[in-house]
Image (cartoon, rainbow, N blue to C red):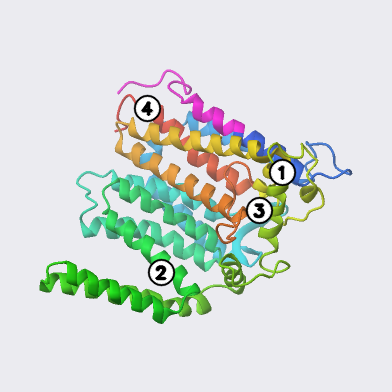
Amino acid sequence: MRKQKSIFENIDWLIVGIYLALVLIGWVNIYAAVYNEDHKSILDISQNYGRQMVWIATSLVLAIFILVIDGKFFEAFAYPIYGFVLLILVAVLLFGKEVAGSKSWFEIGAFRLQPAEFAKFATNMALAKYLSTVNINMKDFRTKLVAGTFIIIPIAMILLQNDTGSALVFCSFIFVLYREGLSQNVLIIGFFAVLLFVLALMVSKIIIVSVLAGIAVLAIALLRKTRKNIITISVILAMAAGVVFSVDYFFHNVLEPHQKQRINFLLGKDTDLKGAGYNVNQSLIAIGSGGLTGKGFLNGTQTKFDFVPEQSTDFIFCTVGEEWGFLGSLVILGLFTALLYRILFIAERQKSDFTRIYAYGVASILFIHLMVNIGMTIGLLPVIGIPLPFLSYGGSSLWSFTILLFILVKLDSYRTFILR
């Protein structure tokens, strides 16, 4: 195997360019989100935008460090890195600081670190390592069990930290498993389970089960009345009914009060615009008031007067919508779309199975973050508190997304030969 002549050989500069554009746009909008007359300098490290500058600088150092490392390192040490991150997740449960109800942070002075963010790329590497192993087949039950275990362990640890939003992101790996041969029936079952869950919160459960029973009877009548078909349809009906009747228990005994309030608001069962619906309502006002071209840089009234909570973190897209309008929002979505498309293009040109699988993991994680974050700012999804990649304020998220992406950039630079 030949060696690279330079760390910049075969680097995909389009990905790097999109990354830098998004990070720079994020920094400017964080400045706008927390701007005040007493702190005008964008380099003021007492403010979020000044601290974000430090995170950006250190992220670039991390990116260069990753590009310097031999590409074989990431596959060779995928399991040890995964194990180390799991230990950190245990440590934060024991010694972490509780912030906003979640015990998911290490705090040293003004420095905070959220291990759950780093579990994403570590899980992605471990999953890619396992699925790229010789003789692994997603049709085998053992393969599904082991792959599922890699994903479920960090989910369980993060749920114990009371950080539901971060835990849900790990569901994105279902797309990776599907790409590697998982039956589409799993996706279909998952979709209908979510649909039944939502319907059970809005419609009488007796009505839902009655409709399902009617569909089952019709299916039996239309299909061949074999014992196998009747048993299969009956089992599906029983499982669907089980999901419907378990919703109340899950909703009232598993979800936190604020999570229940947000779901009720989203479904129209709670219209308290000063309570659970305040964030989303103010977010919609901010984005809607931007119109086509926006109010202009630093001219957003919702932004300037702090009507939207967490506007530099979870709701950073509000600032984009208000100050840059529909066209500015379209630019952001266009950059993310280009990034996702490029990652998928990179995935399919690989000779290395490990790199291909890892690339699909990167795309899946970024897609879920993008969909959920923007979905919650425009009222299509409940507020679960996850950042918009590269734009939201926060060192942990920016570091983790930088590591996630630049490991792929490094692995892709070896695309002309297999990493073995």
**Magenta residues, start to end:** 1-21
Marks 1 and 2, the one that precedes in the sequence: 2
**Residue at the top extreme, as displayed:** 5
CA distance separating discs 3 and 4: 35 Å
| Label 3 SS | strand
Q: How crowded is mark 4: few (under 14 residues within 10 Å), some or many (20 or more)?
A: many
Marks 4 and 1, the one that precedes in the sequence: 1
Amino acid carrying label 2: it is Leu
On the image, numbered disc 2 is attached to which residue? 196
Q: Quadrant of the C terminus?
A: top left
Q: Is residue 202 left or right of residue 225?
A: right
CA distance separating discs 3 and 1: 33 Å
Q: In this view, does 284 lie to the left or right of 207?
A: right
Marks 3 and 1, the one that precedes in the sequence: 3
Q: In which quarter of the image is the N terminus?
A: top left
State the residue at coordinates (56%, 36%).
62
Q: Residues within 10 Å of mark 2 (few under 14, many from 20)?
A: many
Amino acid carrying label 1: it is Gly
- Is residue 339 shown above or below 290? above
CA distance separating discs 1 and 2: 36 Å
On the image, numbered disc 4 is attached to which residue? 414
